Amino acid sequence: MSKLTGTIIAAHGRHYLAQAASSKLQCVTRGKKTDVAVGDIVHLAQTSPDQAVIESIQERKTLLYRSDQFKSKLLAANVTQLFIVVATEPGYSDDLVSRALVAAEATDIKAHIILNKIDVTEPLARTRQRLALYAGIGYPIHEVSAQEAPEAARELLLPLLHGNSTILIGQSGMGKSSLVNLLVPDADIAVREISTALDTGKHTTTFTRLYQLDADTSVIDSPGFQEFGLYQLTEGMLERAFPEFAPHLGKCKFYNCHHISEPQCAVLQAVEAGQIAPMRHALYRQLLHEASQKVY
Ligand SMILES: Nc1nc2c(ncn2[C@@H]2O[C@H](COP(=O)(O)OP(=O)(O)OP(=O)(O)O)[C@@H](O)[C@H]2O)c(=O)[nH]1
Ligand SMILES: [Zn+2]
C-alpha cells in the first residue's frame, strides 16, 4: 500500500474524493469518522489505482462550519476567504448574508460580498442601498454581471482569488454557478468527473467541491444554502464577530454585559443612535439565543 498526500476536493455523505498528484482517488475514512472536510489535506493509504483510505488529516489553518441545535456540519477546511454571492434579483436574505459574515469573522477569514446581475437595472439602486450597510461595516462589495459582462467579472475577481482558497456561498438563483463557470476553466467537466467518481448521479449541485486553479489558488463551490445555524459560537465569539460592535465593547456599565437589555449598555446605545443597524443587533440577539440552545 503506498502512502500519499492529497487534498479533499469533494465530499458526499461519507464518501470523499481526494486529488493526489494527478489522480483522483475515492476515499473512505477508518471506522465511522466523518470529520473530513473539503479542503482538508489528508494522508492516504492507497488501496487500488483509484481508491484510498484516509489515515489522518493534516492540521487545519481554518475550519468553516455551521451547526444546528444537535450537530455541526463542516463546510470547508483551510479556506482563507469567503465570497458571498448576492444578486439584484431574486432578492437575497440579510439574515443569511449576515450569518455568513459572522461565520467568516469567527473563523478569522476575509469576507467579500459579490453583487451579481447588475445588468438588471430596475432593482439595482435598491439593492445597492441595502448593501450599503455592509460596506459601512467595512466589507468590500464587488459588482459584476456574470451574464452581460463576463470578462469584466473575471478581471475584477481573478486577482482577488489569487493566492487564496476561496469558498463561494449564496442562495439559490444568485448566479453562483455562473460565476464559478467564469472563474474556473472547465468547471463543468470537473463536476462531471467528480460526480461520476463519487457516484452522485445527477445531484451535481448537492455537494461541495474544490477546484485547484494553481498551486496556491483554489475555489470551493458549496451548494446553495437556505439555513446557516451558528449554534457553535460562544457569547465572546459572537460579540467579536460583529465588527461594528468593536468601538463600543468594554464601554458598557457592566463588564459582563450581554448587550441585550442591560442599562447603560454601549452597544444598545449605539443601536439607538443609529450607529449599529437594528437588523444586525437582532441577529446578534438571535445567535446568542441559538448558542444557549446547543445540546451537544
Ligand atoms: N440577468 C442576469 N442573469 C444572470 C446573471 N448571472 C446568472 N444569471 C441567471 O440567474 C439564474 C441563476 O443562475 P445560476 O448560476 O444557476 O445560479 P446559482 O446561484 O448557482 O443557483 P443554484 O444553481 O440554484 O444554486 C440563471 O437563470 C442565470 O442565467 C447575470 O449576471 N445577469
Ligand atoms: Zn452592553
Image (cartoon, grey):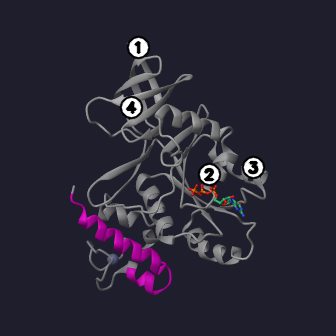
Q: Are marks 4 and 2 in contact (CB under 8 Å)?
A: no
Ligand 1: does it lie within 8 Å of the C-beta at label 2?
yes
Q: What residue does disc 3 label?
A: 155
Q: What residue does disc 2 label?
A: 177
Q: Amino acid at mark 1?
A: Ser
Q: Quadrant of ligand 2?
A: bottom left
Please report whichever mark, 4 or 3, sits nearer to the chain's N-terminal start: 4
Camera-near label (4 vs 1) is 1
Element assignment for label 3: helix
Q: Amino acid at mark 4?
A: Gln
In the image, what residue occupies the spot 37% across and 35% down?
Answer: 59
Q: What residue does disc 4 label?
A: 58
Q: Is residue 257 above or below residue 35?
A: below
Q: Amino acid at mark 3?
A: Glu
Indicate which disc residue 178 carries. Answer: none
For the residues marked 2 and 3, what is the alpha-carbon distance in whole angstroms?
17 Å
For the residues marked 3 and 1, what is the alpha-carbon distance in whole angstroms?
42 Å
For the residues marked 2 and 1, what is the alpha-carbon distance in whole angstroms?
36 Å
Q: Is residue 261 above or below residue 225?
A: below
